[in-house]
Image (cartoon, rainbow, N blue to C red):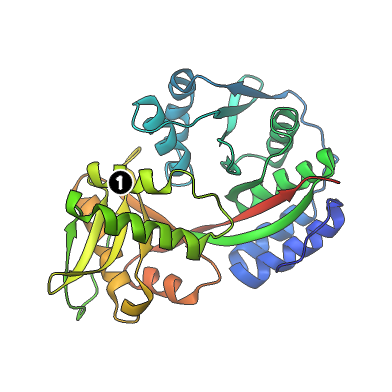
Amino acid sequence: MNSVIMHGCCGLRRVAAAYVHDHYGELAWAQGNRVAHRGLTDKAGTMQALVETDVHRFAERVLPWVAHAPVVHNVLATNVEAARDGRRTFDGALWLTVVDDGETVGVAHHTPPYGLLICPMPPAAARELARAVAPLRPDLSGVNGLSETAEAFALAWGELTGASVVPAMAQLLYETDRVALPAGVPGRGRVATADDHDLIVDWALAFHAEAVPDQPLDGIADTAARRIVDGEQLIWEVEGRPVCFAGASHPSAGVARIGPVYTPPAQRRHGYGGACTAAASQRALDGGAVRCMLYTDAANPTSNSIYRRIGYQLVDAARQFTFAPAR
């Protein structure tokens, strides 16, 4: 779906439901249908969005809470830990918590120029978050999160700001605690080293250009290089020739995130991507992770089939929305 959806909530709900059904199937259709019938008329009540710029205070308050659902909070948790420990910088970051009667009900994170990363929370909390973010980030470029929460925020954002809302990439979230290594795929996995720097950076940029061409390139090369130093990049090679790579984060609350996974076009259809993903996942599990998780493009049946074959199971649907300011 490439058409721009204007900020009127009824139109967005109708198109969002169809979009979810087309790309996710029955699981997300149920989620989208629930959102479509809820509306924006309920009140936030005692909910309040707290804005924090000090990641250390945010980490102390939030990390124990997100650890109770470590898979769906993994991206935010790893960002918080990396910022807290000085391994990454997030210039201009907002660390956001929504509380209800003093109890945390949801968390989010925003670093310009990227979209808002929103974690699962009640729809009313997502709307309260939109109200808090709007005056602070009037040019917010979009939102990314599990479908139900992202849709609630996007609907509220359109109504509050008059922005147009465009459904972007549809994703699926998978997890596993046991990997089935594919048989018959030539080659082996090895951890990337400093000698692989240029190759990994080139492949990371190529993945970005192919998978998310509308997203900014800021920090992609630096992140790829840092992950080599941290031992988070695995290369699959055949007869000494690299043919694929997969990232694997250090565990947060026992969960390691796999990705990106990239095979150059000339090396595809040989099983290298599945083998590399399985090897990276097994290495993470052997290294102490309790579970591995990853996101896939919901519109790519090949990658989804590969991940299911090596042991990954569907957890939930996710989606991105982009915002175009009102003129």
Image-based side of 6 in relation to 288, left or right:
right
Q: Position of residue 29 (x, y in %)?
A: 66, 65
Asked whether residue 177 appears in the rendered view, the answer is no
Q: Residue at x 30, y 56 (%)?
A: 200
Please determine whether, in this image, residue 256 is positioned above or below residue 22: above
Q: Give the SS element for disc 1.
A: helix
Q: Residue farthest to the left?
A: 239
Please determine whether, in this image, residue 88 is positioned above or below residue 9: above
How many marks can you see?
1
Q: Residue at x 35, y 61 (%)?
A: 203
Nearest the eye: 184 or 67 = 184
Nearest the eye: 118 or 316 = 118
How would you rate the neighbour count of disc 1 (Cα within 10 Å): few for under 14, some for 14-19, many for 20 or more? many
Q: Residue at x 76, y 42 (%)?
A: 157
Q: Residue at x 64, y 59 (%)?
A: 168
Q: Position of residue 16 (x, y in %)?
A: 73, 61
What's under tag 1, amino acid-wise?
A: Ala
Q: Position of residue 210 (x, y in %)?
A: 49, 66
Image-based side of 101 in relation to 265, left or right:
right
Asked whether residue 286 appears in the rendered view, the answer is yes
Figure quadrant of the N terminus = bottom right
Q: Position of residue 131 (x, y in %)?
A: 75, 31
Nearest the eye: 196 or 152 = 196
Please determine whether, in this image, residue 18 is positioned above or below residue 72: below
| Residue tagged 1 | 225
